[in-house]
Image (cartoon, helix red, strand yellow):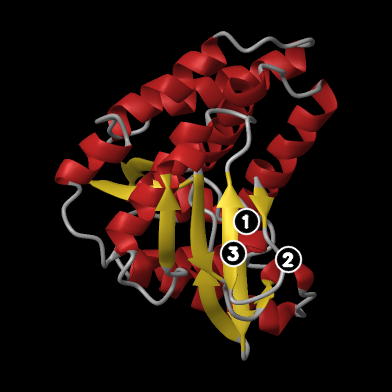
Amino acid sequence: MALSTGGTLVRKVYNDNGDPLGKYLREVGFYAHYGSSELIPDLVESLLDQRAVVITRAPGTRCSELQPDGDSRAGLSADYAEKVVDLLSMGPDLGTLKQRYYDSVGASAYRDRVAAILGDYPTGSRQAEEIVRRLRVAASRITITDEVLIKLDWNASNVFVEGGVVSQFIDFEQAFVGTREMLTGILLHNPFWCARTVFGVLCRRGMFRGSSADVLPYLDFALAAVIADAFERNGRPWSERRLETAYRRHVVDRVAELSTGS
């Protein structure tokens, strides 16, 4: 991905790390679905032949550049979760949009693709193999409910803050048709956010129905989807150390934070 610098507009060009056309279509499709929201930049121009888009620059500072204390982290996490739900509540019926931008691939097919990729995922140790097996089982067994257009990458570098509150979200090239439960696992995936706070908002707003004990398969799925996406794009498996670290950081530690609230 190449971004322009300076000014009020950003030109985003999709690189060859994966399918540039697919990334372009997924991002444009996300704008087509949620473009009326003030929580994402305006799509000024889409350039199919150049595999590029021109968007307005997000206001404020990336969350990843902040170092909030405990109270600030909890408050920002609550605002983050509220605004994700606000954004996703604005989309109309998927219908034609799914056919045009997402190859008519729905949540069931996405789940099955993630499981299939992990089924062929090479591992170098028994421990790594067990982690991949667990992720694959979770991916193959999660329940499919009502479909919603979501994305895989909600990390802190893609969330902007202005005046102490979330101003906009960016980067939708990993958009896909999933479910609210998939989204819950994905939103809880990133350690920047207070897991218990985010989960509380999602439950109150009706994005997830169940207890914190019901979230584990979706945390497993979120990591499975990230690993499958990376492997599909570059064909290289993660190292054993990276896999074990990621599982501990994005699943084990997040479950512990959900339980303790710390």
The image shows residue 259 at horizontal and vertical percentages of 59, 58
Query: Which residue is under mark 2?
Result: 64
Marks 2 and 1 close (CB-CB < 8 Å): yes
Query: Which residue is under mark 1?
Result: 155
| Drawn side of residue 61 relative to residue 166, left or right | right
Identity of the amino acid at label 3?
A: Val
The image shows residue 247 at horizontal and vertical percentages of 69, 36
- 2 or 3: mark nearer the eye: 3
Mark yes or no: residue 190 visible: yes
The image shows residue 241 at horizontal and vertical percentages of 84, 28
Residue situated in front as seen by the camera: 238 or 131: 238
Within-10-Å neighbours for mark 1: few <14, some 14–19, many 20+: many
Identity of the amino acid at label 2?
A: Ser
Marks 2 and 3 close (CB-CB < 8 Å): no
Identity of the amino acid at label 1?
A: Asn
Residue situated in front as seen by the camera: 78 or 92: 92
Residue, far front = 49
Within-10-Å neighbours for mark 2: few <14, some 14–19, many 20+: some
The residue drawn where x is 15% and y is 44% is 95
- 3 or 1: mark nearer the eye: 3
Check the image and report above or below for 80 versus 155: below
Give the image quarter of residue 9. bottom right
Query: Which residue is under mark 3?
Result: 10
Q: CA distance from mark 2 to mark 1?
A: 8 Å
For marks 2 and 3 on the same chain, the one whose residue lies earlier in the sequence: 3
